[in-house]
Amino acid sequence: MSTHRDDIEGFLGEWTAAERSGDAAALDKLLADDFTGVGPLGFTLSKQDWLDRHAAGDLTYRTFELADIAVRRYGDAAVVIARQSAAGAYRGHEVPGDLRVTLVVTDTSGSRQLAGAHMSFIAGTPGAPPVPGRP
């Protein structure tokens, strides 16, 4: 992936690096002021909530990557659907290893920011509910 902020892939590379390293200062610049994150169990986090998890050291990642990235552009915004693979812990409890994520990336005043993130379990993966109708 490129590391330039002028393309979606580069922006996503910056975001994943900041998440992986717990860089709250970088994330503060990468997240829109009205950012909302939706976790795999349906809870919501404001931008400040998202940043606080990293700043306090409650959330730590050993790995954090995106794969199977599909981007759809809509003017100054893009919707990204990807597979998030991570190894880490929140307050000592392991986080789900694989999630499906939908990211909303905006381009306001020439600066890309993440406006929203929605995560869901991928049925049948470790730590997720089973695929419906299968034992």
Image (tube, rainbow, N blue to C red):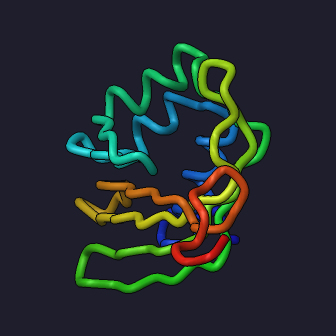
Check the image and report above or below for 127 versus 131.
above
Query: Residue drawn at (70%, 71%), measured in percent from left and top?
Result: 1
* Residue 2 location, quadrant: bottom right
Q: Can residue 7 be seen in this snapshot?
A: no
Q: Can residue 31 be seen in this snapshot?
A: yes
Indicate the position of residue 81 as horizontal and vertical percent values. 47, 74
Check the image and report above or below for 112 versus 75.
above
Front-most of residues 126 and 51: 126
* Residue 85 location, quadrant: bottom right
Query: Residue drawn at (60%, 42%), measured in percent from left and top?
Result: 18
Check the image and report above or below for 113 versus 29.
below
For the image, the number of numbered tags is: 0
Query: Residue drawn at (61%, 52%), measured in percent from left and top?
Result: 16
* Residue 87 location, quadrant: top right
For the C terminus, the image quarter is bottom right
Indicate the position of residue 53 as horizontal and vertical percent values. 49, 24
The reply, left or right, for residue 26 in relation to residue 45 is right
Front-most of residues 47 and 127: 127
Indicate the position of residue 114 as horizontal and vertical percent values. 37, 55
Query: Residue drawn at (40%, 64%), measured in percent from left and top?
Result: 103
